[in-house]
Image (spheres, rainbow, N blue to C red):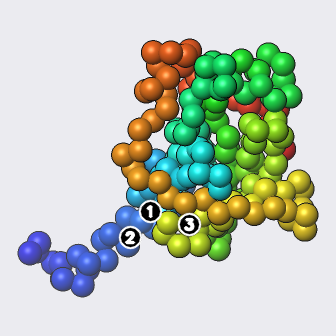
Amino acid sequence: MLRGTTTQSLKAIPARLALIGLALGLTFATPMSAQAQPAEAGLWYDDTGRGAVELVPCGQKLCGRIAWLKELVNAEGNPLVDRYNPNPARRTTPICGLQVVGDAQKLSDGTWDQGWIYDPKTGASYNVALSLQTPDQLKVTGYKGIKLLSKSFTWTRAPADLPRCDAAAAGSAKAAPKAEALPWAAQ
């Protein structure tokens, strides 16, 4: 033991360092990407069972891309594209890898809200709220501005080893853009 110190004074050192850090404006918080993944992160089958979205942290928010499709091509054998997108320039973007959830923020009650969700089946985007119902069921609520006129769906957790459509489509279709802003989807 150091001369002139007691066990009690040694135990107080971490608390003193934390106070000094706060006084200097330093934070010791770890960004979400370095912390444990939120329970909502992972692969989720959508309500139709024909697609799966991978939810991942994006900064302090939650985002998601289409990671699996039951059918990679349409009836003519062409890769599925975002043909209903309101922006004509994006109507040839592959569905596989398309960002469909963005900017969801964690609320104090543990749910996620204030983000957006895009429906490539219609080309419409909505505000989104996400809440874990069970470890394997996610309630996804889409709404426009207020939740009074919302519609909710249940997504089911998919296995982590689900084959990714981008790997299957790599040889037959142009890869989807990785991290592109979606200004048409922002609310």
Can I make out residue 179 in this image? no
Screen quadrant of the C terminus? top right
Circle 2: is it few (<14), some (14-19), or many (20+) Cα within 10 Å?
few
* Relative height, residue 175 to residue 27 (above, below): above
Disc 2 vs disc 3: Cβ atoms closer than 8 Å? no
Q: Nearer the viewer, residue 163 or 64?
A: 163
Disc 2 target residue: 16
Q: Position of residue 127 (x, y in %)?
A: 80, 52
Q: Which residue is mark 3?
A: 137
Residue topped by disc 1: 20
CA–CA distance in space, label 2 to label 3: 43 Å
Helix, strand or loop at disc 1? helix
Image location of residue 134, percent across then percent down: 53, 73
The answer to whether 125 appears left or right of 58 in the picture is right
Q: Earlier in the sequence, mark 1 or mark 3?
A: 1
Q: Amino acid at mark 3?
A: Gln
Element under label 3? strand
Question: Is label 2 in contact with label 1 (beta carbons under 8 Å)?
Answer: yes
